[in-house]
């Protein structure tokens, strides 16, 4: 079994990830369940510049669209609402949608890089209270700018031991060493495999055990065959996780990372 905890839909910036591509790739590459967030809540470009307001959609509009897709495919799709942490906070309508759809909402997604707002910023306290109230893990991009440094998420996790936090990418574009060290410092802090080399995941397992890492991919960021190859045709990193990784760890460790940790952390029942 495979649960992918980091999947997207939506069209924003250079991203165009139709829901159909998610369903196609899941079927073709044997993914049993995907947790999706919608990139249409991005607030800043890759250069850190605010996206013009006329190109943005409200947090509530994006959540409604995402819920409709998941509700139609609830046996294989769960929702991780992407929060616009620079401009918005969950309002009464958002909270009502969350409560009414708690059965298909599994966590809250932060993107400090595309919001230019750090997860340890005091302004996010209401989000963490909401996460605690509804027993939702907080999943956050790490890497690429000071606001998205894994240490900033560690600070939030340390302040809120009642909430579980996931360091997506474990500091994208680095050797992952800082994020790996942080994994062992808090019981409520986890990492994922999204664009993380297998070698780094092996180091994390050796140091802290396989219970601290979840499988994630960013599917379908490189198209509907993201699990197979990148746009240039080079073999995808995730082929290593599906194949060679199996021979590098025990079956128990493999199962933990590919689905059991996700089942436990997010309460997924397939």
Image: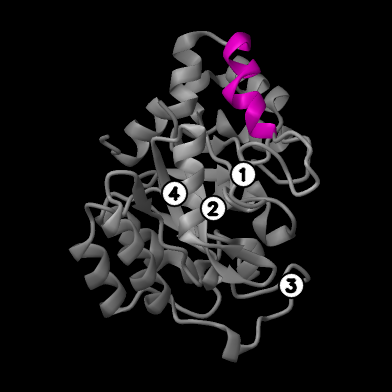
Residue with the mark numbered 4 = 23
Quadrant for the C terminus, please: top left
Image marks 1 and 4: residues in contact by CB distance under 8 Å:
no
User: Mark 3 sits on what residue?
Assistant: 48
Task: Write the residue at 38% across / 26% down.
Answer: 260
Instruction: Report whether residue 157 is seen.
Output: no
Are the residues flagged by discs 4 and 3 in contact, CB closer than 8 Å?
no
Q: Nearer the viewer, mark 3 or mark 1?
A: 1
Position in image of residue 171 (x %, y %) = 69, 45
Compare residues 80 and 227 and report the one nearer the observer. Answer: 227
The residue drawn where x is 23% and y is 56% is 102
Q: Residues within 10 Å of mark 3 (few under 14, many from 20)?
A: few
**Scheme of colours in the image:** one colour
Residue drawn 41% across the image and 56% down it? 80
Q: Which residues lie in the magenta part?
A: 237-248
Circles 2 and 4, Cβ within 8 Å, touching? The answer is: no
Q: How packed is label 4: few (under 14 Cα within 10 Å), some, or many (20 or more)? A: some
Q: Earlier in the sequence, mark 1 or mark 4?
A: 4
Q: Position of residue 154 (x, y in %)?
A: 56, 46
Alpha carbon of mark 1 to alpha carbon of mark 4: how far? 11 Å
Mark closest to the chain's N terminus, 1 or 2 = 2
The mark total stands at 4
Instruction: Work out whether residue 4 or residue 206 is closer to the camera in this orientation and state it.
Output: 4
- Nearest to N terminus: mark 3 or mark 2: 3
Q: 172 and 3: which one is in front?
A: 3
Reply above or below: 1 against 262.
Answer: above
Q: On the picture, is 146 further left or further right than 92?
A: right
Instruction: Quickly name the residue at label 2.
Output: 140
Tell me the CA gap for discs 1 and 2.
Answer: 24 Å
**Quarter holding the N terminus?**
top left
> SS of the residue at dot 3?
loop
């Amino acid at each position: 079994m495979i649960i992918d905890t980091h999947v997207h839909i939506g069209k924003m910036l250079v991203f165009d990830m139709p829901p159909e591509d998610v369903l196609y790739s899941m079927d073709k590459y044997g993914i049993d369940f995907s947790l999706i967030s919608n990139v249409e809540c991005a607030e800043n470009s890759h250069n850190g510049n605010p996206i013009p307001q006329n190109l943005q959609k409200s947090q509530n509009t994006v959540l409604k669209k995402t819920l409709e897709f998941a509700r139609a495919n609830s046996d294989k799709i769960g929702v991780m609402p992407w929060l616009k942490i620079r401009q918005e906070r969950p309002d009464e309508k958002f909270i009502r949608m969350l409560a009414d759809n708690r059965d298909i909402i599994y966590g809250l997604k932060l993107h400090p890089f595309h919001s230019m707002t750090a997860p340890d910023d005091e302004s996010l306290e209401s989000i963490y209270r909401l996460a605690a109230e509804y027993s939702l893990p907080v999943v956050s991009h790490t890497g690429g700018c000071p606001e998205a440094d894994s240490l900033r998420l560690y600070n939030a996790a340390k302040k809120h031991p009642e909430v579980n936090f996931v360091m997506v990418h474990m500091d994208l574009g680095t050797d992952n060493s800082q994020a790996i060290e942080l994994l062992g410092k808090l019981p409520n802090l986890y990492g994922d495999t999204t664009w993380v080399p297998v070698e780094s995941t092996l180091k994390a397992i050796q140091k802290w055990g396989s219970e601290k890492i979840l499988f994630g991919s960013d599917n379908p960021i490189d198209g509907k065959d993201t699990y197979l190859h990148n746009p240039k045709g080079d073999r995808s990193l995730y082929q290593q996780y599906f194949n060679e990784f199996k021979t590098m760890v025990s079956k128990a460790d493999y199962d933990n990372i590919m689905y059991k940790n996700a089942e436990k952390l997010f309460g997924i029942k397939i």
